[in-house]
Image: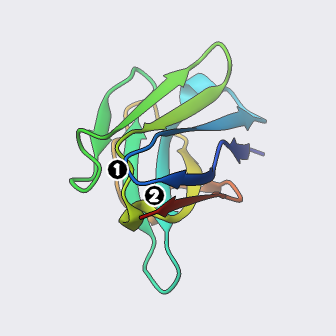
Amino acid sequence: QVQLVESGGGLVQAGGSLRLSCVFSGRAFSSYGMAWFRQAPGNEREFVATISSPGAVYYADSVKGRFTIARDNAKNTVYLQMNNLKPEDTAVYSCVAVHSLFAITSIPSDYAAWGQGTQVTVSA
């Protein structure tokens, strides 16, 4: 069974940066596509970014040019580098996985494994 553990969240001022990490275990990491979603209180779950096993990436328009998703298959870890953070980026960020080499999808139901999430708070 896949397990995902996120870290790196915290409180940052607008314009600042954070790097989230997600450690994957339980299966062969290189066989999975990975992504980040976020959810703010009272809002729907929102797609942020995804990366396939070979490294193809896709971003939500709201974060394009500010966030970068990357993966290290040797460390079974996916990262989300977040720069120029804005108050509207405040949310719980969750790492997710799909058992597919080439999937690039922003649909939550396509992802079978979800982490517990890490809180990101951006102050104005």
Give the quadrant of residue 74: top right
Q: Give whichever of 101, 70 is nearer the camera.
A: 70
Q: Give whichever of 27, 15 is nearer the camera.
A: 15
Give the quadrant of residue 101: top left
Q: Separation of disc 1 and disc 2 at Cα? A: 7 Å
**Residue that badge 2 annotates:** 110
Sequence-wise first label, 1 or 2: 1
Q: Residue furthest bottom?
A: 42
Report the amino acid beneath label 1: Thr
**Where's the C terminus, which quadrant?**
bottom left
Mark 2 crowdedness (10 Å alpha carbons): few <14, some 14-19, many ≥20: some
Q: Determine the residue positioned at 68% across, 18% down.
A: 75
**Where's the N terminus, which quadrant?**
top right
Q: From the viewer's perspective, is residue 100 above or below residue 123?
A: above
- Measured from the top left, where is residue 114 in percent x and y? 64, 56
- Residue 40 in the figure: left or right of residue 50: right
**Residue that badge 1 annotates:** 105
